[in-house]
Image (spheres, rainbow, N blue to C red):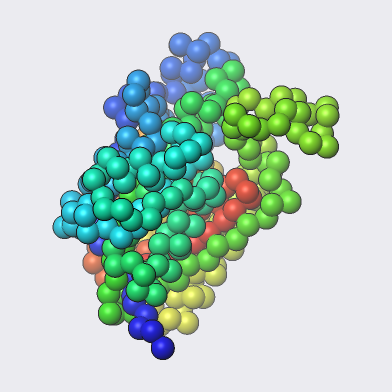
């Protein structure tokens, strides 16, 4: 039988655009019927970052990747795999991961994109982990990168206020210690509810097949109330599953919860329902908004840089989004 390896978290990095967009800009510049207080009370978001001219998912992802490699003490030519999770690629083809590979100056290694919306980073993490566990790759780069500001409808106050741009990245490395790093991961999808969150592309049929009366889909569309209920329910399930998994693995418990940074009310409702301590939850959505696949790796990088996550801690990553998809991962720092 071939040797199996553990999957260690070797390094993290992130990149946020320089342009800060406070809530007031939606009122003062875009003349939307909203306000800073209205947005903060419903979402917890104070500001977000928007990509500037020339900034793309690949450019932001490349900077995050370089920082993750520096944190890991590795060079680009030591990587064996690059995966980028995104729903806002630079191009339909080639993959954003290939652009990042070229910008880093990697060898001729596999590089491809993965699309699972806000759960994309955890789905990509799972794929990279399989390469490492089986010995196919020794070092893997996983990037979550988005420029959702270019896919939102700035006349819709209910959706355009939610999203921001950014990128996060991690380097995973093989280790002989099977109980190190990534301990478990859970992935789920429900395509029957795909209409609740959608982002169109250049080839999206309009109107959609079988729906001749459906409005033309030109921008990101989200059915807010139903998505809220879905997110709270799934986050509760994922936390409770993880607590059971920790007990079965002999872990003392979850030291830090890093959820998808989607809405403060969703996070509060979920942790209150399952009795999870608020002081153990990493939240930065007030500064960055919902950055989709970039959300979890940005928050993970910030947690490590600020000391929220310390060596030996058990960290739970939780995400949910379009697809519908939802996912979780337990890792030991």
Q: Vertical placement of 91 versus 24: above or below?
A: below
Residue farthest bottom in this picture? 1
Q: Residue at x 83, y 37 (%)?
A: 210
Q: Vertical placement of 249 versus 56: above or below?
A: below
Q: Residue at x 23, y 45 (%)?
A: 105
Q: Residue at x 63, y 57 (%)?
A: 189
The x and y percentages for residue 306 are 23, 50
The x and y percentages for residue 332 are 33, 69
Residue 61: quadrant of the picture? top left
The x and y percentages for residue 54 are 34, 24
Q: Relative to 204, is 241 on the left or the right? A: left
Q: Residue at x 31, y 46 (%)?
A: 101
Please indicate, yes or no, whether residue 181 appears anywhere in the rendered image: no
Residue farthest front in this picture? 108
Q: Quadrant of the N terminus?
A: bottom left
- Number of marks drawn: 0
Please indicate, yes or no, whether residue 35 appears anywhere in the rendered image: yes
Q: Relative to 50, is 103 on the left or the right? A: left
Q: Quadrant of the C terminus?
A: bottom left
Identify which residue, 169 or 35, lies in the foreground: 169
Identify which residue, 53 or 277, lies in the foreground: 53
The x and y percentages for residue 80 are 30, 60
Q: Relative to 289, is 201 on the left or the right? A: right
């Amino acid at each position: 039988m071939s040797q199996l390896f553990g999957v260690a978290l070797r390094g993290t990095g992130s990149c946020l655009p320089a342009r800060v967009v406070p809530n007031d800009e939606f009122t003062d510049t875009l003349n939307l019927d909203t306000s800073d207080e209205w947005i903060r009370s419903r979402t917890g978001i104070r500001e977000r970052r928007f990509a500037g001219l020339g900034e793309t998912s690949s450019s932001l992802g490349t900077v995050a990747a370089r920082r993750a490699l520096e944190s890991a003490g590795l060079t680009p030519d030591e990587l064996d795999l690059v995966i980028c999770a995104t729903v806002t690629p630079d191009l339909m083809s080639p993959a954003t991961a290939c652009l990042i590979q070229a910008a880093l100056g990697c060898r001729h290694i596999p590089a491809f994109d993965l699309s699972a919306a806000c759960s994309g980073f955890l789905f990509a993490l799972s794929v990279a982990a399989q390469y490492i566990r089986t010995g196919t790759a020794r070092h893997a780069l996983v990037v979550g990168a988005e420029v959702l500001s270019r896919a939102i409808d700035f006349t819709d106050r209910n959706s355009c206020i939610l999203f921001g741009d950014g990128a996060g990245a991690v380097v995973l490395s093989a280790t002989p210690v099977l109980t190190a790093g990534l301990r478990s991961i859970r992935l789920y999808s429900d395509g029957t509810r795909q209409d609740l969150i959608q982002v169109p592309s250049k080839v999206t049929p309009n109107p959609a097949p079988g729906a001749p009366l459906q409005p033309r889909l030109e921008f990101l569309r989200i059915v807010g109330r139903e998505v809220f209920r879905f997110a709270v329910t799934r986050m509760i399930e994922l936390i409770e599953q993880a607590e059971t998994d920790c007990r079965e693995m002999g872990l003392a418990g979850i030291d830090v919860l890093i959820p998808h940074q989607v809405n403060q009310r969703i996070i509060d409702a979920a942790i209150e329902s399952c009795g999870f301590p608020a002081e153990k939850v990493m939240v930065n959505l007030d500064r960055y908004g919902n950055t989709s696949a970039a959300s979890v790796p940005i928050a993970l990088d910030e947690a490590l840089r600020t000391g929220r996550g310390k060596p030996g801690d058990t960290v739970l990553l939780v995400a949910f989004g379009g697809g519908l998809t939802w996912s979780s991962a337990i890792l030991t720092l």
